Image: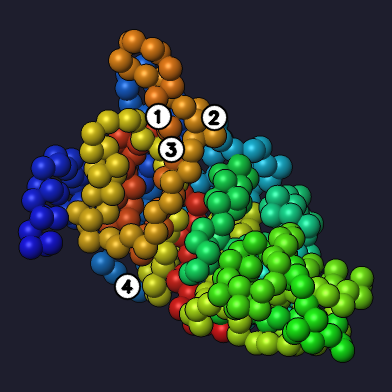
Amino acid sequence: MATFLIKSLVSQITVKHSPSDHTSSRIEIKSALIPVKRCRSGKIPVLAASIRSENDHSTEAQKKKNGNAINLQSSLLQDAEYDVASKDAHPRPLSSTHSSNSVSNGPRLRVAYQGVRGAYSESAAQKVYPNCEAVPCEQFDTAFETVEKWLVDRAVLPIENSLGGSIHRNYDLLLRHRLHIVGEVKYAVRHCLLANHGVKVEDLKRVLSHPQALAQCENTLTKLGLVREAVDDTAGAAKHVALQKLEDTGAVASSAAASIYGLNILAEDIQDDSDNVTRFLILAREPIIPGTDRPFKTSIVFSLEEGPGVLFKALAVFALRQINLTKIESRPLRKQPLRASDDGNSGLPKYFDYLFYVDFEASMADENAQNACRHLKEFATFLRVLGSYPVHTSMM
């Protein structure tokens, strides 16, 4: 019944197929980033790049594909109304091997994360880059800026948690800054209740931690009758408890934070759900070259004109090509958050304009993904590819 309903809805949409939907010959790929304002003709100004799809699987053919993929990725870094100007005039694309867990024998990568030593973000950075130099940043904004200013090579920042949901601040910063998503890492978060040595659970009156960590341990903290106080990050809470030598205050943080700051672990795995996983994004100045040799994911952001079924049409461009969407997030459009009423009576703002962030399971080197994005551009008022990167499946 559900399948019949979906097919019926999709059948109501007129699809404009291009010749490349049905052939493997040379195809034209439009820019992955377009301005918000349309031309007077109603058409969206685009830049063109191309990628050749060949049946020949020889080494030379593969080299040509890789070269064309570089051209495709370079088109992702164009000026748009929502972007902050970047000082990188000619970013150097990376191969997919640069985002793997292993690090080549060379200078240590400097990887920014938000928080202080012992933060879960630091552990996530060390998971994906075991030999890196992890660089702590006070705020998420700072981590973005350190990459843009060439102070570090990468940033590893949380984007969503299986219990707490999306990290909205980082969604907004993805659009404000001109970094590229070059990978992801999923990290199993195990919260501990920490306190100074000699302090027992019954001595505690309050507990400090990041708001999401406190929310993820709500049942345990409620049973203990502890007053919850939010701070900027989990490891920062542990550091404060240790430095101030507090005897009535504990912290919710990692076991690594306990070791670093000399705290005692009063209880382990105090999160409400054992399946507590945070997904982190790996950000770089240069885009990664998409491939088809392994499962890839692509992240995009777009905006639409208001109207019946417009969002449905936007999502249908992926369904029509059998591309699976793994996440959709909406955020108010920063430059124009409210749209005026059309009824002519009050003239007051009536509804929000939104940006839609979508993750889908396909590589931008895949012809289906290229055609889906090209189809979406026909009616999107803004579209930007944030990154096309290998899917991360392991947990820690």
Q: Which callout, 4 or 3, points at the residue further toward the start of the chain?
A: 4
Residue 37 is left or right of residue 129, and the answer is: left
Res 217 → quadrant: bottom right
Q: Secondary structure at mark 2?
A: loop
Q: Quadrant of the N terminus?
A: bottom left
Whether the residues at callouts 4 and 1 have beta carbons within 8 Å, the answer is no
Type of residue at label 4? His
- State the image coordinates of residue 282 (x, y, percent, origin top left): 60, 64
- The residue wearing badge 2 is 335
Type of residue at label 3? Tyr
- The residue wearing badge 4 is 57
Q: Disc 4 versus disc 1: distance between alpha carbons?
A: 51 Å
Whether the residues at callouts 1 and 2 have beta carbons within 8 Å, the answer is no
Q: Nearer the viewer, mark 4 or mark 3?
A: 3
- The residue wearing badge 3 is 354
Closer-to-camera residue (186/234):
234
Closer-to-camera residue (79/56):
79
Closer-to-camera residue (324/138):
138
Q: Secondary structure at mark 4?
A: loop
Q: Disc 4 versus disc 3: distance between alpha carbons?
A: 43 Å
Q: Which callout, 4 or 1, points at the residue further toward the start of the chain?
A: 4
